[in-house]
Amino acid sequence: MSTFLWVIFPYICLATFVVGHVWRYRYDKFGWTTRSSQLYEDKLLRIGSPLFHFGILFVAVGHFMGLIVPQSWTERAGMSQELYHIVALLGGLPAGIACLVGLAILVYRRRTVGPVFRATTVNDKAMYAVLAVVIVLGMWNTIAGTLLNLGIAGDHYNYRDGVSPWFRQIFWFQPDASLMEGAPIGFQLHALLAFLLFAMWPFTRLVHVFSAPIGYFTRPYIVYRSRDERPGTATGTRAQKRGWERVQ
Amino acid sequence: MRVMAQMAMVMNLDKCIGCHTCSVTCKQAWTNRQGTEYVWFNNVETRPGLGYPRGYEDQEEWKGGWIRADNGRLKLRAGGRLNKMLNIFSNPKMPSIQDYYEPWTYDYETLLNAPAQDTFPVARPTSLISGKHINIEWSANWDDDLGGSTEHTAKDPMLKGIEDKVKFEFEQTFMFYLPRICEHCLNPSCAASCPSGAIYKREEDGIVLVDQDKCRGWRMCVTGCPYKKVYFNHKTGKAEKCTFCYPRVEVGIPTVCAETCVGRLRYIGLMLYDADKVLEAAAVENEHDLYEAQRSVFLDPRDPAVQREAERAGIPGDWIEAAKKSPVLKLITDYKVALPLHPEYRTMPMVWYIPPLSPVVDVIKDTGYDAEDKDNLFAAIDALRIPIEYLANLFTAGDTRPVEDVLRRLAAMRSYMRDINLGRDPQAHIAEAVGMEEEEMYEMFRLLAIAKYGDRYVIPTAHGEQAHALEELATDCPVSSFDDELLDSSGPFGEGSGRGAVTPVAVENLKMLQERAQSETLVSGGSKRGRVNLLNWDGRGMPEGLFPQREHNVEASAGGGSPHQRTDDGSVLEDGQARPDNVAGADEGQQ
């Protein structure tokens, strides 16, 4: 069971994540959008959306710090465990709160503003549920783990000894399931649901994360394109299929 | 010099009767889908009026277009790249659905199923956005014909500065119609605003399009366009805009709005311009110079040097020829009667307008004086400040001189042609008074008043050698000749199967449209195989196969030649195929 939860399941999810995105990009570029509802409602969105998005961007940076950067590195850089926790708390807590408050406003908006609710699909609802639970669990772990010191047996649970190495091991294909077995239930659930979210990712509107328009900074303002440049143009509007290329 | 070709349009506002046919046909062709219910790629506004979306011209509010920075360079009014990225999670200046209007339908179901009752049942309006019953309080065209003008029109952004002079008492007011489509600007601020780079300007013909596969729905283009002609499809989450009917234009037929224009007031043709000079011209300091600056960007295709450069830039010969004959070129460059809409947005718009003389003529007529007399008209143009200042706010960033010049030309043409029409001697001095030759004036009259189809639309087709790749032709299927009647259209799987059975609809449409538009006589919409393409039939003539043949004809043919057609008794058709046609049609196909 432990092997399934902490080895097999993450790989299934990550594989779905990668393959799913490739598939979605190849076959559903048209569906690849933020599906904005700003046209319907503006005022709540203006507060909620930036709050949530900037919050979750900071949370993502925090996760990079905590999961990817090993403890030994920060220690070598002269950062003690206490200092690290203070930094993590000072950065993570406001970001997490912004993210949660933003999410609350957005969910409230989605439920109460008629046209926005009408435009919400089942897919959206499932995704929001998982996303919200993951964020709430993450907040709980932060608060319970560090602020209230409610770790296992009253001890302080250091996720950089358990969750983080396990997470890194996934990427060199040697995950040690026992590292996660010892983690508090909050961390376990957070990790599991996060992977579930990764698996759902390519099939939801979350794909818009990968269209962050970085190229805008470097491209010229006006884009010129030739009529024939569209790749794979074949009969009518259908794209030319591989193996069916016309004789030139 | 970097020569580029631009497909451009001119609209003659004097001839617009505000019938909205262009809007309706455009909507039927392009935006009759869910998600675009509120979208009008083409709309007709009554001016003075708020327009659609409400008050879109107030750029202090909506932040569209470019402004000239202190260092002399252009920047987006809504903010540059960094600003856009910081605001990407919620666009601070996007019109809401209420600024357009909440689209609705009617509850016809209740109306149709209502039982007999004392009170007359009504169909209540239902919002297409919220699905609830709504009280309709605004639409794309609410202030049509100055409706409700006492309440709304005073808010027209273009009345700023002259509001105290404008009267909205019924007798003293003036109005005209302004049909609007996307301007297909030379310096499009929508394209510049798009973070994803999905909006592009086509190199060949300058049409500005949204790549639906690259658009990610950031909505910055909606803000960026000062004309508010990029729309957000709330179902697909993508931006959409007027396409200049590129599938039609590519095969040489005019846009839907132009084709169906009842007043025949639209002109389509090419303009050649120097792409290297666009930014410089768009950034001239004084807004009043923008009109002249944009004209200076245009190149004269009759100039051999320009022709050489155009050829070097890869513009095909037939396009240069078309550019020479372009009615748009004549109206903008030769006769100088067309003006750009809001040059002060610095986007270098390419749909230009001939300002209406009618407000001036109407005033003279009301005073009892001769409204076609040159001197009366000239004096009125000088005296009637209000319509002219208003027109200047629309077309020349407030500079009244170019508007006066145009109106003088139109007035001169009016009185010059009257002499000819009344059989009097034409007076050359009228033409001279506005700096034109007599012949030139007559040519202008023919273009503006007679406005033959072939003169209004000079649209070169896209390259022949690339034709196979064009959307609308789709001729990669091995149909060799569309002109032949494809009698034997039956393949192994019944009618329409097999090689060569299907003529692409677009090609059929194109041929018919051409025939109908260019011939002097009635052209039946009749088509191959005794079928009628009702899309093409405009009520002229009676195409074969539209109506069943008369009773005795059917009997005669059935009894005489082809008993195998009668399938009521369950007998098999001769060639063993199911034929969905009516008896008359099938009969024709067989013989």
Image: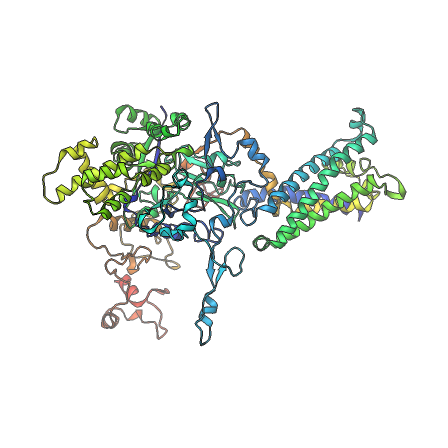
- Front residue of this view, candidates B106 and B120: B120
Q: Quadrant of the C terminus of chain B?
A: bottom left
Q: Is residue A9 above or below residue B378?
A: below
Asked whether the viewer can see residue A97, the reply is: yes
Residue B548: where, in percent of width, then height? 28, 67
At x 28%, y 65%, the residue is B547
| In this rendering, position of residue B577 left or right of residue A186 | left
Q: Is residue B223 above or below residue B516?
A: above
At x 15%, y 33%, the residue is B429
Residue A188 image-quadrant placement: top right
Asked whether the viewer can see residue B504, the reply is: no
Q: How many labels, in total?
A: 0
Residue B82: where, in percent of width, then height? 57, 31
Its colouring scheme is: rainbow
Q: Quadrant of the N terminus of chain B?
A: top left
Residue A215: where, in percent of width, then height? 55, 32
At x 40%, y 43%, the residue is B243
| In this rendering, position of residue B455 left or right of residue A66 | left
Residue A206: where, in percent of width, then height? 62, 44
Residue B525 image-quadrant placement: bottom left
- Front residue of this view, candidates B2 and B250: B2
- Front residue of this view, candidates B389 and B339: B389
State the residue lying farthest toward the right: A153
| In this rendering, position of residue A40 left or right of residue B72 | right
Q: Is residue B45 above or below residue A165?
A: below
| In this rendering, position of residue B125 left or right of residue B474 | right
